[in-house]
Amino acid sequence: MAQEITLSVIKADIGGYVGHSSIHPNLEEASREQLEQAQRKGTILDFHVTHCGDDLQLIMTHTQGTDNATIHGLAWEVFERCTQVARDLKLYGAGQDLLSDAFSGNIRGMGPGVAEMSFVERKAEPVLIFMADKTSAGAWNLPLYKIFADPFNTAGLVISPALHDGFRFEVHDVKEHRRIFFDTPEESYDLLVFIGAPSRYAIKAVYTKKDNEIAAVSSTERLSLIAGRYVGKDDPVCIVRTQSQFPAVGEVLEPFATPHIVEGWMRGSHHGPLMPVSVREANPSRFDGPPRVVGLGFQIADGRLVGPRDMFDDPSFDEARRLCNLIADHLRRHGPFEPHRLPMEEMEYTTMPQVMERLAGRWEALE
Ligand code: F6R
Ligand code: MG
Ligand code: MG
């Protein structure tokens, strides 16, 4: 059998510049130096370092499979080294997402976000990597549903025999730590029962129904649930394979032309529109937002990352960005009121319960 390669995207917020708006170029530089060494040693085949907002993104290819201790350890070392750089510059929240002092074999559950998939490269292997800031894992539910299950978005579901059978969705319940699979189109209504509640149910992966080939994978870590206290939103990542038996590049990008409303934004406590931007524009500033998504495209060639192409660096997304600004204006007018502010159950994972605690003794029973 042909050799499988693994594409790993591992990210962490290990210090913001300025505040939580972006990252300092020295962090990217330090990461590149370390990953170059790892490439020379043969630990990884190739890499690309970038950022979305205050999150440092390590995109790597290798042959060690998913959940590999060497690869996760390498990412952990890079984040630790960058934390030092962040401390020297007194960047904001240096080391924020490294929730443990010591690496123990798998980076999952330790703070950073992880999306990984292994596959045998096709004759041509175009992939898109989405990275978001000021939001959380469920933010991919709506676009992934549209990409893989909505014929109004993905023409190929109707037109192409290679897509017409539909896809299989793996959904994680991030609160109860359990999972469930749904086949579409036949079970799309069942799927929507759960993924319509993205703060609790997140699409972890999508597969072709015919041969269970991996099509998409996302990070579903929930930092607040891991740490048991507010440590910021999870700023998720997602990998999507495209073309041929998968939706076309344009079908994968299309959902982002209609910005949907996600949770996150200021203090991880507000709803706001997800704005598709180029990497250059991925520096959320207004009210620490609005939430951003960048999309980088690569052709993978024998493990080499040929690219990236900055997919949202395209005037065809100008109207989506404009709409985001209009939605942001309107939501902002609600100030501290729901539905701009998250519902009470979600505020449980913010700092607000500490304020409520102080007032607890002042409540009087009604007759
Ligand atoms: C949202 C985010 C920021 C911070 C906000 C307050 O994910 O990271 O909006 O929550 O800037 O930050 P602190 O409490 O660190 O001053
Ligand atoms: Mg931050
Ligand atoms: Mg962030």
Image (cartoon, rainbow, N blue to C red):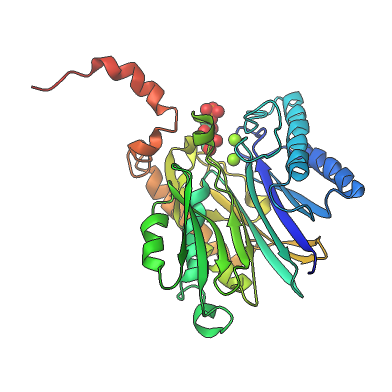
Question: Is residue 176 placed above or below 229 in the rendered structure?
Answer: below
Instruction: Tell me if 146 is positioned left or right of 71 in this view.
Output: left
Name the foreground residue: 25 vs 170. Answer: 170
Residue in the picture at 75% in, 68% down: 121
Residue 327 percent location from the top left of the image: 42, 53
Residue in the picture at 68% in, 46% down: 10
Give the residue at the far front of this rendering.
1
Name the foreground residue: 7 vs 132. Answer: 7
Instruction: Tell me if 99 is positioned left or right of 151 in this view.
Output: right
Residue 128 percent location from the top left of the image: 66, 62
Question: Is residue 136 placed above or below 217 in the rendered structure?
Answer: above
The quadrant of the picture showing ligand 2 is top right
Residue 97 lies in what quarter of the image? top right
Q: Quadrant of the C terminus?
A: top left
Residue in the picture at 54% in, 71% down: 209
Residue in the picture at 38% in, 22% down: 355
Question: Is residue 340 placed above or below 143 in the rendered structure?
Answer: above
Give the residue at the far top of this rendering.
361
Question: Is residue 364 placed above or below 201 in the rendered structure?
Answer: above
Name the foreground residue: 22 vs 219. Answer: 219
Q: How many marks?
A: 0
Give the residue at the far right of this rendering.
40
Residue 342 percent location from the top left of the image: 38, 40
Q: Quadrant of the N terminus?
A: bottom right
Name the foreground residue: 163 vs 85. Answer: 163
Residue 217 percent location from the top left of the image: 60, 57
